[in-house]
Image: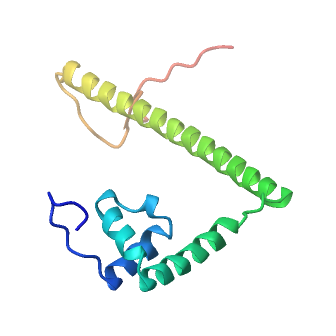
Amino acid sequence: MSDGSRKEPAMDAKRFAALAAAYGGDLRRWPQADRMAGTNFAASETGAAILGHAGKLDALLDSYDVKAPGAALYGGILRTADRHLVQRRRKRFWWLGLGLAGIGLAGAVAGLALVSVVTPEIQPDHYVLDANATAFGDAGPDGETVEEDL
């Protein structure tokens, strides 16, 4: 109960240990609401022991040094990134070609539909479908054949 205007619950050892484990041994890193009660509890023997342990852990963590990556790791990362970019470009190019083929196919289908709708059906006056009829006319033996002299 640091000031008379607010009634703060007294800090117990369990709460103090949890805060020290979460925020470390430096009370300046603790939440503002818990700093005053933590300062009061740190004056006790239990609080000083908990802060001492948290301070040792902080010092151990602060002394850890991460080494720079080696040339092999750096080169491996660049090769992997380059390979990924190449694959992405190829995939984009493939999808572009597939899209253009789809657009062309859609245009052909639309043109076919337009021609089939616009072109009227011409019905001949008489047409006999027999075995000698072809797309070029009657190719039967009784048809007239004209031979050209070459």
Quick check: 56 left or right of 29?
Answer: right
Q: Relative to 124, does residue 12 appear above or below in the rendering? A: below
Out of 63 and 3, give the one closest to the viewer.
Answer: 3
Q: Relative to 3, does residue 52 appear above or below in the rendering? A: below
Out of 135 and 84, give the one closest to the viewer.
Answer: 84
Query: Residue 75: x and y, percent?
Result: 81, 54
Out of 149 and 130, give the one closest to the viewer.
Answer: 130
- Residue 29 makes an appearance in the image: yes
Query: Residue 134: x and y, percent?
Result: 39, 34
Count the numbered circles shown: 0
Query: Residue 139: x and y, percent?
Result: 43, 33
Out of 104 and 81, give the one closest to the viewer.
Answer: 81
User: For the view shown, which residue lies furthest in the top direction?
Assistant: 149
Q: Residue at 35% across / 33% down in the picture?
A: 106
What is the image's colouring? rainbow
Q: Residue at 44% across / 74% down in the picture?
A: 20
Query: Residue 144: x and y, percent?
Result: 43, 23
- Residue 139 makes an appearance in the image: no
Residue 14 falls in image quadrant:
bottom left
Q: Quadrant of the N terminus?
A: bottom left
Quick check: 19 left or right of 122?
Answer: right
Q: Quadrant of the C terminus?
A: top right
Q: Relative to 101, does residue 23 appear above or below in the rendering? A: below
Q: Residue at 60% across / 15% down in the picture?
A: 148
Quick check: 110 left or right of 144?
Answer: left
Q: Residue at 78% across / 54% down in the picture?
A: 74
